[in-house]
Image: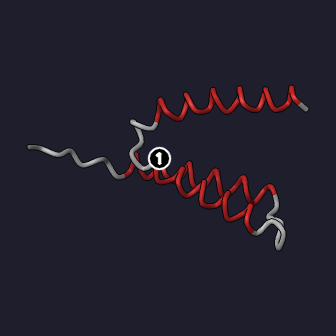
Amino acid sequence: MYTSNIFAILGLRSLYFLVSGIVDKFHYLKVGLAFVLIFIGTKIMIASIYKVPILISLAVIALLIGGSIILSILIPKKSVEG
């Protein structure tokens, strides 16, 4: 049990550095990650009432992150001149 938690934390740590490296390149990624956190929080709160299937959860998370990246590419960030 301890080793699985250690490996999970190490995986999350490397994922954090990956996300922190690309968050400046995709300006809607922060919004997408915020919606992912909202979805996961809602999923945890309703877990005793309804169990969301894993495939649906993965699809929603992939759509939110992928959609925010695609939206960042399609809608360029407006530069502020001053």
Residue 51 position in % (x across, y down): 83, 66
Identity of the residue furthest to the right in this view: 1
At x 62%, y 32%, the residue is 15
Residue drawn at the location 64% of the way across and 61% of the way down: 39
Name the quarter where the N terminus is drawn. top right
Q: In which quadrant will I find the C terminus?
A: top left
Residue 76 lies left or right of residue 11; in this view the side is left
The image position of residue 44, as x and y in percent, is 74, 61
Colour approach in the figure: secondary structure
Q: Position of residue 60 (x, y in %)?
A: 66, 58
Q: Residue at x 63, y 26 (%)?
A: 14
From the viewer's perspective, tell me whether residue 42 is left or right of residue 25.
right
- Which residue, given by chain and number where applicable, does mark 1 sit on? 29
Q: SS for tag 1?
A: helix
User: Can you say whether 60 is above or below 50 in the image?
Assistant: above
Looking at the image, residue 25 lies above or below residue 72: above
Q: Quadrant of residue 3?
A: top right
Q: Residue at x 57, y 55 (%)?
A: 64
Image side of residue 63 versus residue 53, left or right: left
State the residue lying farthest toward the front: 2
Location of residue 9 in the rendering, given as x and y in whole percent from the top left corner: 72, 31
Q: Is residue 73 above or below residue 5?
A: below
* Residue type beneath disc 1: Leu
